[in-house]
Amino acid sequence: MEIILLLTGLTVAFIGTLAGSGGLIGMPVMLLIGIPVHTAIATAKFSNITSSFTSFVYLVKERKVALRECLPLLPIAVAGGLTGALLSDQIPARHLEWMAFFFLLFALLLSVYKGIRPKGDSRIRYRIYGYLYGISTYDGLFGPGQATMLMYTHLLHGRSYLTSVALTRFQTFLSCLGAFTIYFQNGHVEWMIALPFASGALIGAQLAVRIAGKLSLKQVGILLHILTLLLIIQLGIQLFF
């Protein structure tokens, strides 16, 4: 099972770093091999902590984003992750799936309508903070589609692709760190599952950030739309059938 977890973690982090939606693969695989849902979520959080942080550090070193651009996200992401994890035992999973379904559908339609075009503006506008907090809360609660939501939020507000990747990795690291502390305290972490999954995720994320710089914005848009559509279909099948 360790090999399956390592390869799954690698694939999830590779896809998730480039365009999000790694949960499209990771969660179903873990549930399919018999891992309890809260343990699967805790495993995903732990792997995201390691893979997101290391890929973010790489992008900062490559000067794809300035650290000062990211710091305003720190309290928002941590608070959202903690909020979501604390609510995780109180909100039915089906409600979370409906939330993700409609948010992703809205983001997909909006991006097709408006297009994804960087504006060359490095400022984070205050009006998106509420969206970012909500997404981090969802990440603490459930997770699949969270990184895709963040990518859409930053891209549709005019950020460049690599800056969007860096901000998404930073916020994912923080929200998962906040959420993981709660899952750990509640006894949902199984280290024999979490460690091989996180090892694969670490490799996958490092491969992805080195490929990301070679993608054009058009290629990114196509990849993002395809993965979002697949995630919407997966959620739709679970909700309607």
Image (tube, rainbow, N blue to C red):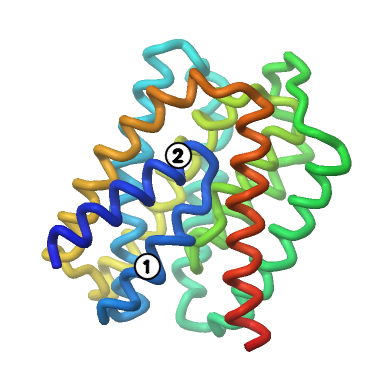
From the viewer's perspective, is residue 6 above or below residue 38? above
Q: Which x, y percent locates residue 205?
A: 34, 37
Taking the spot 59% from the left edge, 48% from the top edge, the residue there is 148
Position of the N terminus, as image quadrant, is bottom left
From the top left corner, tell me how far across and down residue 149 is, in percent.
Answer: 63, 49
Residue 237 or 69: which is nearer the viewer?
Answer: 237
Image mark count: 2
Identify the residue position indicated by label 1 in the image. 41
Quarter of image, res 25: bottom left
Q: Within 10 angstroms of label 1, few (less than 14), some, or many (20 or more) residues?
A: many
Q: Nearer the viewer, mark 1 or mark 2?
A: 2
- The answer to whether 135 is drawn above or below residue 38 in the figure is above
Determine whether, in the image, residue 112 is placed left or right of residue 189. Answer: right
Specify the label residue 17 is tagged with.
2
Image height check: is 238 above or below 189?
below
Percent x, y of residue 241: 63, 88
- Pointer 1 or 2: first along the chain: 2
* SS class, disc 1: helix
> Between residues 40 and 240, which one lies in front from this camera angle?
240
Q: Amino acid at mark 2?
A: Thr
- Residue farthest to the right, as pictured: 113
Label drawn at residue 84: none
The amino acid pointed to by label 1 is Ile
**Residue 115 falls in image quadrant:** top right
Q: CA distance from mark 1 to mark 2?
A: 18 Å
**Closer-to-camera residue (130/228):** 228
> Quadrant location of residue 211?
top left
- Determine the residue positioned at 21% across, 60% down: 194
Q: Position of residue 141 (x, y in %)?
A: 50, 68
Question: With 58 as the anchor, is 84 left or right in this view?
Answer: right
Taking the spot 76% from the left edge, 35% from the top edge, the residue there is 156
